[in-house]
Every structure is written in C-alpha cells, then in structure tokens.
Image (spheres, rainbow, N blue to C red):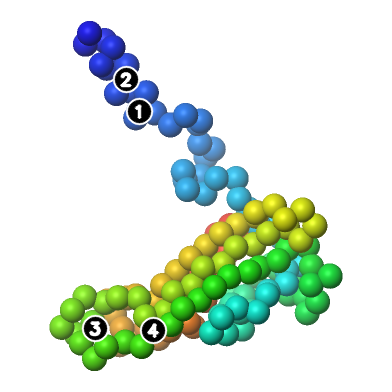
Amino acid sequence: MRLLTLAALLSLAVPAAPLALGQSPTQGNYAIPRRAAIFIEEMPEGLDTFIAAEIVRRNLPLRLVPRREDAELLMVGTATVKPRKWHEGFLTGPVDSAVGSVKIVASKTGELVWVGAAGDKTFWTWFKRPGLRRVAQLIVRQMARAIR
C-alpha cells in the first residue's frame, strides 16, 4: 500500500514529457523565427502602433511589412484601458489600468506561433510610465525571448 501511494505521488510530481534544456513548462515549442516578415493587425486603443515602435526601438530581428499579403506571420491582439482611481497605488495596491494580449499566427496555415500578455501594473508607478506604452514594452520583451 505504501509503495502504491509513493508511486502515485511520484507520477504527479514528474512531468509527462521531459523538458528541453532552457525550456520552461509554459514555453512549449513556440518560437518566432529570426528575420520573419510580420504584419501587425490594427488593435484596439492603438496597441499596434506601440508594439511596432517598441520592436523598432529594441531592434528585434523581425521585418515589419505594411501589407498583409507580404507577411509570413500575423500579429493580432486586443487591449483595454480603464482610468485609474485617485487612490490606486497610493492607498491601495497597484492594479492594471491597461492590459493587452497578442498572438502571432502563421499567415498561410493559421498555426499558432506565439502568445503573450501583459499589464501595466507596477509598484514603482512614479518611475515607470503606465498605460499601453508599458504594456507594449513588456509584450515585446517577451517576444524578444522567443525569437530563435
């Protein structure tokens, strides 16, 4: 009976498939190919322009194309912004006032290539710019880690 209980606990503790070196369980096999042509769809609240500006600023090895037909990858996403209340971050803990999520899919097959999401919540609100610019910065930082 003890052996059966130990075997059951070990089966829950050990992942079903071994992870590759340097791969976290949430990463999966999703990777953005270097020098891929990517088209950024229009997103709510103008998040697409912030993401494009951040990709250029960070000099990521991606080619931004102006037409959907020329793209190997398509980026689509959503964003929401709500006004901060006067007491948020001062009397209460910080909360997200702007959040965004994006996914990158292959344009020909529609296969999911990468997903990411971020919010602008930070304890150091007076040092960091809140809003969609911060959200785009965090999303592009995640993208940079996924480029192979």
| Label 1 with label 2: CB-CB less than 8 Å | yes
Q: Which residue in the protein does label 3 denote?
A: 88
Q: Residues within 10 Å of mark 4 (few under 14, many from 20)?
A: few
> Secondary structure under badge 4?
loop
Q: Earlier in the sequence, mark 3 or mark 4?
A: 4
Q: Which residue in the protein does label 1 denote?
A: 12
Q: Residue at x 60, y 45 (%)?
A: 29
Q: Is residue 107 visible?
A: yes
Q: Which residue in the protein does label 4 denote?
A: 82
For marks 3 and 4, give the CA distance: 12 Å
| Label 2 with label 4: CB-CB less than 8 Å | no
Residue 33 vs 60, above or below: the answer is above
Residue 121 vs 131, above or below: the answer is above
> Secondary structure under badge 2?
helix
Q: Nearer the viewer, mark 1 or mark 4?
A: 4
Q: Position of residue 60 (x, y in %)?
A: 64, 70
